[in-house]
Image (tube, grey):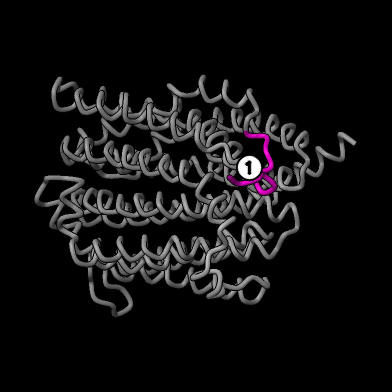
Amino acid sequence: MQTGNDTSFRKKLLSLILPMTLQNFVFALVPVSDAIMLLFLSQESMAAVSLATQVVLVLTLFVMSITAGGSMLAAQYWGKGDTSSIEKVFGYMFTLSLPVMIVFFGCAMFMPEGVMRVFTDVPELIENGVPYIRIASFSYVFMTLASVFETLLKNVGFVKQCTIASVVIVFLNIVLNAVFIFGLLGAPEMGIAGAALATAISNGTGFILCLIFNLKLTKFRLRLKNIFHIDMDLRQRFSKYTLPYLLNQLLWGFGFTMITVIMGHLGTDAATANGIAAIVKDLVSCLCFAIAGGSVIVIGNELGAGRLDTAKEYGDKLLKITIISGIILGVVAAASAPVILYFVHLTETAEHYLLIMLLMCSYYILGRSINSTLIGGIFSAGGDTRFGFICDTLTMWAFIVPFGYLSAFVFNWPVMVVYFILNLDEIVKIPVVILHYRKYKWVKNIINEEMK
């Protein structure tokens, strides 16, 4: 029996994390293609876009909070076999995402300069970032809608189709980047604005593909009754478990954005090196995020089906997997330094910063791997979102952000010391996170729980 469970676990996990890893990886290639091509224009162009894309990070925090709440419920409903409730979750995710999408589109379209001033006070970076943000605002709409449809598709067994859509998005983005940035194939030479246009078109194509997959492969539809008439039981469950996750993501995300703001105010060299290091982190973290995403579905299915002991067993296996993968990926990140430095053309100071940043990634990735799988994956699958909110908020806002600010602008410590402090968030909370995991408070069926 144990062998059968092991085989079933490995098969299900691999069927989720392999396409999810590929999906995360190809998405992470988008800023890579932007960075490489924009570096041919100037270091300032690359730094400006790196800061401008922080808007996407903040938007993603809102959307991910909504879709993560939908995913934790949909996974348990799917395990139970309750398809009607899954469709209600689908509609409610759309209802919550709509105002978020409108606000971010409006700010980026009509107040791009104000948005850029949040991230930097360097006039040249602000001037370069404004056209990117304004044109990229259309991509925010497509990304938000696609995320809702992707969440549904992943939870009902169509992970591969989401990966296909992602591959198309990235391939199209890279091609269109070259066309619009440099004016190839008869297109106008648009520079930074061309990178934004390529992003908008490719994300629009991705949304259309997700919509087609939904209509052709599933029986789930976005029905008006589920958008405008919300099931109160669903609303209560969603609010109870998603609100702490939402607050966690927002406060953590704004804290993470503050890190970029602090680095952005330390000069162009620091901002450029930090932008490239962030891309490398995201690339090597693709497997971490895939394991976390797969954990929500695998653990959630077992909890929803009432197999609590099996969910606990799977959680222990996932913890071992994420520690091993974190160590390996950390080594990969550090070892990539010579290769990255060979291909990028930066000032001597920026190259020095980047080398040290990439070496620091080795321990950061290990912490990210463990915390993303436990807090964002396993705990969330069982509705244990309150702990993550408290842990991440205290770590980021009681330690990282204030100490990082003081070290940069009050104590005037060297840039690399500031960077070291700003990247301690994933490490300092590991002992507490693992201790909480061992209490097994996350082993809970949340869809059969009576709501008060």
Would residue 445 be counted in the magenta stretch?
Answer: yes
**Looking at the rendering, which quadrant does residue 258 occupy?**
top left
Residue 341, percent across and down? Answer: 34, 38
Residue 210, percent across and down? Answer: 55, 69
Residue 18, percent across and down? Answer: 64, 49
Q: Which residues are magenta?
A: 442-452
Q: Is residue 207 above or below residue 401?
A: below
Q: Which residue is mark 1?
A: 295
**Looking at the rendering, which quadrant does residue 70 occupy?**
bottom right
For the C terminus, the quadrant is top right
User: Closer to the camera, 326 or 308?
Assistant: 308
Predominant secondary structure in magenta? loop
Would residue 254 be counted in the magenta stretch?
Answer: no
Name the element at disc 1: helix
Query: Would residue 420 be seen by someone viewing this image from the given angle?
Result: no
Q: Amino acid at mark 1?
A: Ser
Residue that appears at 53% across and 56% down: 235
